[in-house]
Amino acid sequence: MKEDREKENFCAIIPAYREERMIGEVVRRVLKHVGSVIVVDDGSDDKTASEAENAGAEVIIHEQNKGKGVALASGFSRAREKGFDVAVVMDGDGQHDPEDVPRFIEAYVRTGIPVLVGNRMADLAHMPLVRKLTNRYMSWLLSRQMRQYVADTQCGYRLYRLDLIPLVTTQSERFAAESEILLNLASRGIRIDSVPIKAIYGDERSKINPLMDTVRFFRMLRRYSHHKS
């Protein structure tokens, strides 16, 4: 009974764009561990929304693709409206293993740390070399700005305590938003830690544009530094 009550305090938020192939399976597996799954269909032109809904998720639909930052904001808003205390955020393409959700929940219940970021850096055998090098460099750079060490700042598999959400507003709309969230939280003295997770790389195509998203990352860092100074 205690486990059931704890489960009801947690939800999962899954931003999704053209994920009809995997989203149903991801939702069904995640629902074993949390009270609700909120899928934000960010302008998909396939069956992402219907597959997610059929699997048991609540679905928020963006008619146009607005980017991951905006999708996260929609999911956070709905989770708070529903009264959840904590959200696990993950991707819907199968790269984030639903069986790692209990790792986040256990770490949060045990430590009370309000922000936990997945750490894939101990399981690098299957990570593409370019991504490995980029992740290490960006994580080093962002950790220096944050003044606290987070091994894999580019990992989107995370846990957030939802009372912090008013502090995570970002100017970035796409993948740089996830880094900006960490900077905004760290600047307010919020403790951030890591949870080891599996690194899964199959035949799915990453939504990250290596060139443009790297440019957006550095633009975000520059904007943050100017604002801070």
Image (cartoon, rainbow, N blue to C red):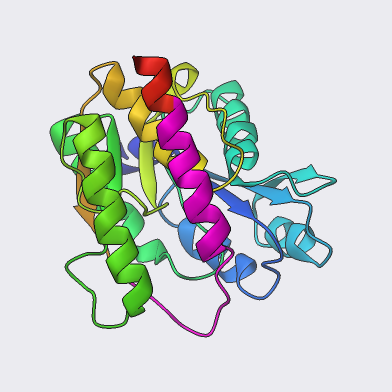
Identified at 41% across, 63% down, the residue is: 98
Which x, y percent locates residue 139? 26, 50
Which x, y percent locates residue 91? 51, 58
Which x, y percent locates residue 8? 44, 36
Name the image quarter holding the C terminus. top left
Identified at 65% across, 33% down, the residue is: 74
Above-or-below relation of 108 to 18: above
- Can residue 128 be seen here? The reply is yes
Above-or-below relation of 210 to 139: below
- Can residue 198 be seen here? The reply is no
Between 7 and 89, the one lying in front of the other is: 89
Magenta-drawn segment: 198-223
Between 64 and 61, the one lying in front of the other is: 64
Identified at 53% across, 46% down, the residue is: 216
Q: Is residue 24 left or right of residue 87?
A: right
Identified at 28% across, 29% down, the residue is: 114
Q: Is residue 115 left or right of residue 81?
A: left
Name the image quarter holding the N terminus. top left
Which x, y percent locates residue 123? 21, 73
Q: Is residue 169 magenta?
A: no
Q: Is residue 43 left or right of residue 102?
A: right
Q: Is residue 75 left or right of residue 89?
A: right
Above-or-below relation of 54 to 6: below
Q: Number of marks in the image?
A: 0
Q: Is residue 220 magenta?
A: yes
